[in-house]
Image (spheres, helix red, strand yellow):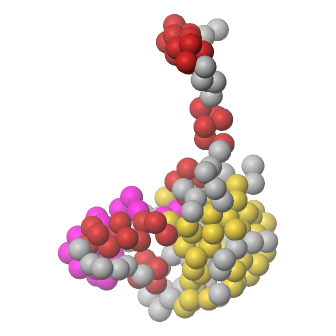
Amino acid sequence: MQTKQETLIGSCAAQRGVAMLLMADLLAHHARNGRVDWIGLRPGRRAEVVAETQVQVAFSGLEGDRARAGKRAVTLIQAEHLPVIAGLLGVDRVTPETLRRNLVISGINLGALKGREIAIGAAVLRVSVICAPCSRMEEVFGHGGYNAVRGHGGWCAEVVTPGLVATGDMVRVVD
């Protein structure tokens, strides 16, 4: 049974000739697929990040990366957030290496994918939790670096299906 507010909203939409969409419908659709712009491996704690053009994804994360299996096996960051972080820091540019994430993804809102499975190349990941910045951001960017990255630091994902991922690969919702 509809609530009074739902009935009123539905009635108003019907009067305007607009179809009512359920929240589930709204959450299921994205304007377009995404794309892998950059791949980085962290071979060890505090080791320099190594950029790659392709990588094999295993259940434990990206081969050659120090990550481990589970909901934080792979880290992703939104390419569109890099200029935001730079703006908050008052610098011209922030590179993916400094943020120490594995995959830079453009064109699709990673925040809207929490709990969803995404196909990236031959691999399938499940976006799990926010990848909060570490205190090292203060060391790398200076005073205020940690707070500049907060809310823009990306997402962690667990591996559902291992496979090869390369720069330029499409990122699309599976489920």
Q: Which residues are magenta?
A: 137-156
Q: Left or right: 169 with respect to 16?
A: right
- The magenta stretch spans residue 141: yes
Residue 44, can we see it?
no
**Residue found at x 62% / y 63%:** 34
Across and down, in percent, residue 94 comes to 37, 79
Q: What residue lies at 30% left-to-right and 79% top-to-bottom?
A: 92
**Residue 146 at what x, y percent from top left?**
30, 69
Say whether residue 160 is visible.
yes
Does the stretch in magenta take in 16? no
Residue positioned 65% across, 87% down in the render = 53
Image position, residue 101 (x, y; %): 51, 75
Q: Is 165 or 107 nearer to us in this picture? A: 107
Farthest left residue?
A: 143
51 up-or-down from 172: above or below: below
Task: Locate residue 14: give its quadrant.
Answer: top right
